[in-house]
Amino acid sequence: MACPNDRRRRSATVAFRMTPEQKRWLDRVAAESGMSKQDFIMARLHDEAITVVPNIRVYRALRENMLELLRELSRIRAGGTVDERLHDEVERLTREFVDLRGEVDTATVNTERHDILEMSRR
């Protein structure tokens, strides 16, 4: 009996190196999209729209990322400042949640974003 892999079209392997931070980012966005890393990279390379279909895996990935973000924001609450990387992460997660919700009320989102960014220590 022939191995089913004999009929596979994908016979070439492509590998590249990333920093640990880039790998964490790729793992995070691929998990949030509900796609495998390979499918996510190929969709991005082909400039295809990535449609997130909400399911339990996407929910868990978003929940874990939000918990990580909350821990980071709680840590800086003691007097630190929000760096550019954290600001970009908040923006990206905000866009994903708004897209999943389906309704876009940009005035409310922008007002809340502005309020959060202008928060000061008490």
Image (spheres, rainbow, N blue to C red):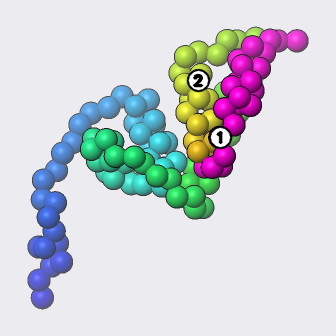
Instruction: Work out whether residue 65 can be spotted.
Output: no
Percent of width and height locating residue 67? 68, 40
- The C terminus lies in quadrant: top right
Type of residue at label 2? Answer: Leu
| Residue shown at the point (63%, 35%) measured from the top left | 94
Mark 1 Cα within 10 Å, few/some/many (few <14, many 20+)? few
Percent of width and height locating residue 74? 75, 26
Instruction: Work out whether residue 108 can be spotted.
Output: yes
**Which of the two residues, 3 or 53, is positioned nearer the viewer here?**
53
| 102 drawn magenta | yes
| 118 drawn magenta | yes
Percent of width and height locating residue 78? 78, 16
Residue 76's place in the image compared with 71, above or below, is above
The disc label shown at residue 104, or none:
1
**Which of the two residues, 117 or 6, is positioned nearer the viewer here?**
117
Q: Which residues are magenta?
A: 100-122
| Residue shown at the point (67%, 12%) measured from the top left | 81
Is 45 displayed left or right of 85 in the figure? left
Quarter location, residue 6: bottom left
Which residue bears the numbered disc 2? 86
Question: Which of labels 1 and 2 is toward the front?
Answer: 1
Mark 2 Cα within 10 Å, few/some/many (few <14, many 20+)? some
Prevailing secondary structure of the magenta residues = helix
Marks 1 and 2 close (CB-CB < 8 Å)? no
Q: Residue furthest bottom?
A: 1
Cα distance, mark 1 to mark 2? Answer: 23 Å
Residue 96's place in the image compared with 60, above or below, is above
**Which of the two residues, 120 or 49, is positioned nearer the viewer here?**
49
| Residue shown at the point (27%, 44%) measured from the top left | 46
